[in-house]
Image (cartoon, rainbow, N blue to C red):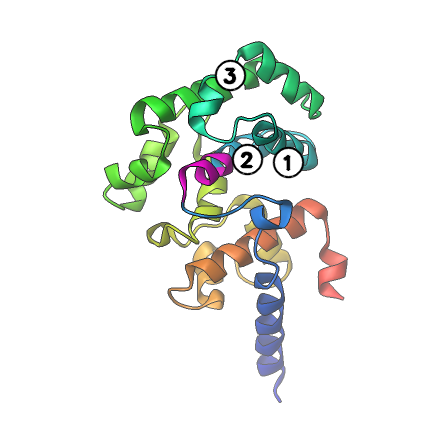
Amino acid sequence: MTSATSRTEDRKRLVRRLAGDRGFAEQYGFRVTNNPSNLFQLLCLAVLLARRGDFRRALDAAHALPDSGWDSAARLARSRHVDRVRVLREAGQRGDVAALADVLGDLARTVVDRYRGDLRRLRAHAGHDPARERELLTALPGVDDQVADLFLRETQALWREVAPVADRRALVAARRLGLGRSADDLAELAGSGESERLAWLVGALARVDLEQRYAEISA
């Protein structure tokens, strides 16, 4: 076997191993399904992950919202600001927690007002056009391109038209592990049309970078 062939086989084995971990969100207890509550929880998770600080605190805060009964846009929209602040602080959020509570409240109310609490309606309004979907997402309070990347990284398993999507951390890990330098490179490794496998691969790569597991993965 030539060295080039050996390297190719090593990459394929690594991709299979990473994709077998079922991505990012599901590994941390968030369901990736195409229903309104789960989609909105993924969007809140993306907003929290995009903030500076320990990603584990973002995960704790994202879990604290549904644990407090705010498992949908409609329920979070009806929550009181003071209660959101308390829940976020108890979950370990730092910095301007009051501003974060405002953002999450505004986000929930806007999703309710524009899409009746259902982000599938955003997709329908966009006509399943990826550029338009991103445009409508970034028009929501608290959602910039980074947040959109994190949300679409997960939902490309469901909204196949947006694939390939890879966030910054996933691409850092892909380069360090020799798996490519772009979302297109990762899509080629995952297999043409395999948006679910791509989502798992990209999410797993993001976890490798966040958890700094390079030595373990390379061993």
Few, some or many residues within 10 Å of mark 1 (<14, 14–19, 20+): many
Would you name the residue on which mark 2 appears? Answer: 45
Q: Nearer the viewer, residue 131 or 63?
A: 63
Q: Magenta segment: does it hold 37?
A: yes
Q: Is residue 202 above or below residue 188?
A: above
Disc 1 from disc 3: Cα separation: 20 Å
Type of amino acid under label 3: Ser
User: Which mark's residue is nearer the viewer, 2 or 3?
Assistant: 3
Is the residue under label 3 in contact with that under label 2 (CB below 8 Å)? no
Q: Secondary structure at mark 1?
A: helix
* 20 left or right of 123 in image: right
Boundaries of the magenta span? 35-42
Say what secondary structure mark 3 lies in.
loop
Q: Which residue is mark 3?
A: 79
For disc 1, the marked residue is: 59
- Tell me if I can see residue 33 in this picture: yes
From the viewer's perspective, is residue 46 above or below residue 213?
above
Q: Residue at x 44, y 47 (%)?
A: 155
Instruction: Please say if the residues under marks 2 and 1 sit with CB atoms less than 8 Å apart.
Output: yes
Mark 2 or 1, nearer chain start: 2
Q: Can the viewer see residue 146 in this picture?
A: no
Q: Nearer the viewer, residue 90 or 192?
A: 90
Q: What residue sits 72% from the left and 64% below the top? A: 218
Residue 211, horizontal then vertical, whole percent? 71, 47
Instruction: Spot the residue most to the top.
Output: 82
Q: Position of residue 95 (x, y in %)?
A: 66, 18
